[in-house]
Image: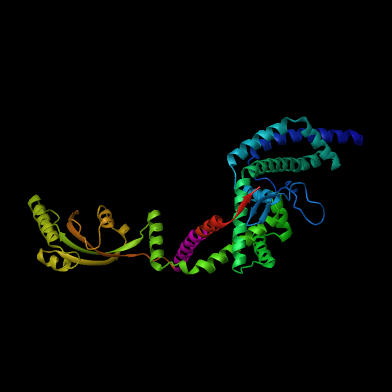
Amino acid sequence: MPTHVARRRCLAFAAAVLTASLGLTAALGVTARAQPAKKPAPSASKPDADGPAPKGTQAIVVLVNDEPITAWEIEQRAGFVSANSGGNPKDMKARAEARWAQIIKDPKTNEKFQDFMRAHNVQSQEQAKALQGDFVKKLQADMIDQIRREARAGMASQFRKQAQEELIDERLKLQEAKKLGVEISDDDVKRMVQGIADRNKMTIDQFAQQVKSTGFDISTLRERLRSEQAWREVVRRRFGAQININQKDVDRMLSAAASDAGEDAFELQVQKVTLPIPGRADQPTLVRRYSEAQTLHGKADGCKNMASLAKEAADAKFEDSKYVKPGSLPEPTRSLMLVAKDGDVLPPATLANSIEIYAVCGRRVLKGDEKQRENAMQELQQKEFNVIAKRHLHDLRQEAHIEYR
């Protein structure tokens, strides 16, 4: 068979394979995670010394105590905010499915595939079948990347106001840091960025390229890290002595967390007097035994005289249970103890073979292990830090001269 005839048959087979693959991938693949884009998304160009600044990028939009914020900075920060805002997965799925349906119906898709096959000099049906999967994956990845770029562009416009306010706050933070002699060097910032890159198993250059592909320049991330680190040091120096968290605060936090999780947050110190009931006791016997229990209950003075009360009734038994977890007690005794105060004596409870009188002597918080307590302490300190930092930033904004242009 002539070579050109065989090649035409290979391309025809490839086109048929593509049609089947497109349908299959549309059914199974549009919700799968796309491969990382090879080209970065277009973004505003950063002014630099290598050439003239793009028109409008250096326009001053805000002055914060006479320090400028440019349009380029706002656009870049809006991209940062947009990239970190997440998105609606359901919306992304619907858009991907609709876009994929258009691609399948587009006659140019098959033309592109044949060009792809020619570029790879397909010589056999087996080779065509092997390459069609690569073509479909690339087509799909490019589609998802385009949808994401469109979504980011739309969201960036929504986040310009938030970006502008963030940059104003950062100017104020860095100005305050300068007053206190706090300086975060370029090497400090580089180490922070390197740490993020390392955690993502990338080099600095790879990480910078990845960041750029999401819609903002890595310099935006650097300046954000610089201002946040400087601000932490400012608040620590000025208000560190006001952040005072003690072990009782930690106890309360652990107790609340345990209660929310349905776990025992504390143990109860419990004493009990038990009045046995014979296995085949008649009604008069039960009434008499319960009357004895009520009499003892009336004489009870918290945990002060529970032991002596047990001596006033025949066969009564006193027991000091020390500390027990509420979850180990039967209902309704458990619920009654949870609402009882220290020193309360519960009403007599009739069981199958006895009548029991419980007294709540005290309670103690379950301490948790050292790691839990350390994490709780850090969380409480961070919450207090955030409150103080927010209040100080509010004061700085009140005192600042902010000019919008």
Residue 318 position, x and y percent, is 18, 66
Question: Can you give x and y, in whole percent of width and height, for residue 15 in the image?
Answer: 78, 33
Q: Is residue 291 left or right of residue 45?
A: left
3 over 299 or under it: above or below: above
On the question of residue 84 being in view, the answer is no
Count the marks. Answer: 0
Q: Position of residue 54 (x, y in %)?
A: 78, 48
Return the residue nearer the eye: 133 or 266.
266
Q: Main secondary structure of the magenta part?
A: helix
Q: How is the structure coloured here?
A: rainbow
Left or right, 222 with respect to 363, comes to right
| Residue 311: image location, x then y, percent | 12, 67
Q: Is residue 374 magenta?
A: yes
Q: Is residue 100 left or right of residue 108?
A: left
Q: Between 120 and 171, which is closer to the camera in this rendering?
A: 171
Identify the residue at horizontal 39%, vertical 64% (top origin). Answer: 251
User: Can residue 77 be seen here?
Assistant: yes
Q: Quadrant of the N terminus?
A: top right
Asked if the magenta segment contains residue 253, the reply would be no
In magenta, the rendered stretch is 370-389
Residue located at (66% from left, 44% from top): 152
